Structure formats: C-alpha cells, structure tokens
Image (spheres, rainbow, N blue to C red):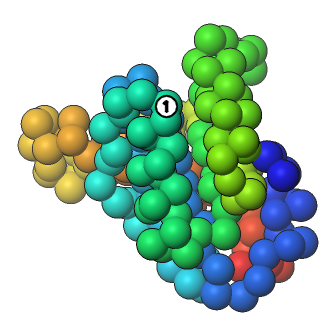
Amino acid sequence: MATMTIEELAAVLERGQPIAGLDLGTKTIGLSVSDLGRRFATPRPVLKRVKFGIDAETLLAFAEAEKIAAFVIGLPINMDGSAGPRVQATRAFVRSMAEKTDIPFVFWDERLSTVAAERTLIEMDVSRKKRAERIDSAAASFILQGALDRLSALGKS
C-alpha cells in the first residue's frame, strides 16, 4: 500500500490516529504532525538527509514514536501544473519507502507552501537565520494542514 488519495485515506483512518506531513528537500525533510483530532498541524524539527537508508530508518522511527497512520508528502508540481525532476524524485522516494513500510503516503500539491511558510515566519518576526532552520517544517505544516482541512471537509477529521 504505497500511495492512496486523500479520499481513500479518509475511508480507512480511525479516530485518534495522527498523520504526518513531509516536505522532501534535497538536504532536509521537513516534518509536521497532526493532533489526535486531526485539526491542527504542528511543525517538528527537520531531519537532515544523509542517504536513503538512514533517512528511511529515521523517518520510520519518528513514525513509530508518534504512532503515525499516514504520511502526506508534498508533491512539488511546477506552477504551470507540469511535473519536473523534483516530482520524479519525490515519487521515487515514496516508491522506495513502500518497500520498507505499510504506512500509506498521500501526495499533496505543495505549490506555494514554502512561500506561505516564509511569509508566516516573517510576520512572526523570525530572524533570517532561524527562518532558514524552520522553513521546511513550516512548509510541511502547510502541506499537512491542507490535507487536514480536506479530511475535515470529507467528514473524516
């Protein structure tokens, strides 16, 4: 069970199961986690990428500790709707993860999530240095919050 749609996820989620948001970068993986009621996305510290095997182990240890039921991973589609090399890399990451876990992944259009995260951090008067440290997890929270809002609209929060 590598991937599913948000609608398919809504059909299988049980109450009290948190889900995680991922913003996959080349150097880091931004993380966020929902509350048990799946209303709010909360940023978590970023994972520094090393190589796939280590990244996967770290991500799965995180999922086990947080009792994650599913991952919502940002799909970096271009503004014109086309899929570039980052989309291919994200899909390859998910295919490789599917060999290591039964936790499902939901792809989520992440267009403008980093822009929104950056604006929010600026509005919070976060320094440029701290913004650089937090931007990926803030983007993961925007990705996850979009999925949580959709789940709520589907009546499955």
Disc count in the image?
1
Left or right placement of residue 156 versus residue 33 in this view:
right
Task: Compare residues 35 and 59 and report the one nearer the observer.
Answer: 59
Q: Position of residue 101 (x, y in %)?
A: 68, 53
Q: Is residue 93 left or right of residue 139?
A: right
Q: Nearer the viewer, residue 21 or 57?
A: 57
Residue 37 is situated, as x and y percent measured from the top left of the image, at 60, 85
- Mark 1 Cα-neighbour bin, 10 Å: few <14, some 14–19, many ≥20: few
Residue 146: give x, y in percent of width and height.
62, 56
Q: Which residue is mark 1?
A: 52
Residue 148, image quadrant:
bottom right
Judge whether 88 appears above or below 56 on screen. above
* Residue 96 in sight: yes
Q: Is residue 113 above or below residue 90?
A: below
- Dot 1 falls on a residue whose secondary structure is helix
Residue located at (37% from left, 60% from top) = 43
Residue at left offset 62%, top offset 11% = 85
Task: Place residue 36 in its image quadrant.
Answer: bottom right
Q: Position of residue 135 (x, y in %)?
A: 31, 41
* Residue in the picture at 14% in, 44% down: 130
| Direction from residue 65 to residue 126 in the image, left or right | left
Q: Amino acid at mark 1?
A: Phe
> Can you see residue 117?
no
**Is 45 rendered above or below residue 116?**
below
Residue at figure coordinates x 71%, y 79% from the top left: 157
